Image (cartoon, helix red, strand yellow):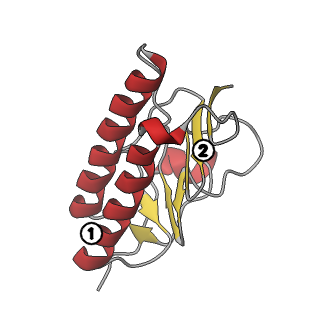
Amino acid sequence: MEKQYEPELGQAVFGQPSQEFAVSELLEAALGHIREELNRVLWNRLQQDCRSPFDNSSARFETEGLSIHAYDWGDDDQPWNLKCGDIEISWYKYIGRGMSVNRAMTPDDIDRFLEKAISIVRACDSPSFGDEADAVNFTYQ
């Protein structure tokens, strides 16, 4: 049975809304892999180090099928930090802290999620991807 998520005090009082289930170590490792692959792809596309949307940076990465938003310090609720298909993952300030997911995930679910997210990120690095302005939205706010 998946562990219900219980936010730390600061997150409960001052943070954005969380999801229902705690993120497992396996899912956290998968997120780390997605983060590293995104950093590699952004370097290839932009030829510079970029602030990661996995950090407390206000960066955002959006493309069809995958959205990653850094923690939002604003007053408006942020329903998630990462969305891929029906998976929504939230964290408190930066990846690895106060992490929760909207549904229970088996190791097979995590494998499918990782495969999908990595394939989306890698497609952004493909020469056939082109320079379509709205295909990848990477911003700092």
Mark 1: few/some/many CA within 10 Å (<14, 14-19, 20+): some
| Marker disc for residue 111 | 1
Residue furthest bottom in the image: 1
Type of residue at label 2?
Glu
- Whether residue 110 is visible: yes
- Whether residue 23 is visible: no
How far across and how far down the image is residue 129, in percent?
A: 52, 41
Mark 2: few/some/many CA within 10 Å (<14, 14-19, 20+): some
Task: Judge by depth and name the residue closer to the eye, 75 or 124.
Answer: 124
Quadrant for the C terminus, please. top right
Q: Is residue 20 left or right of residue 4?
A: right
Disc 1 is placed on an element classified as: helix
Q: Which residue is mark 2?
A: 62
Residue positioned 42% across, 15% down in the render: 47
How far across and how far down the image is residue 34, in percent?
A: 34, 47
Q: Is residue 2 left or right of residue 8?
A: left
Task: Judge by depth and name the residue closer to the eye, 73 or 139.
Answer: 139
Residue positioned 37% across, 66% down in the render: 113
The Cα atoms of the two marked residues, 2 and 1, are separated by 21 Å
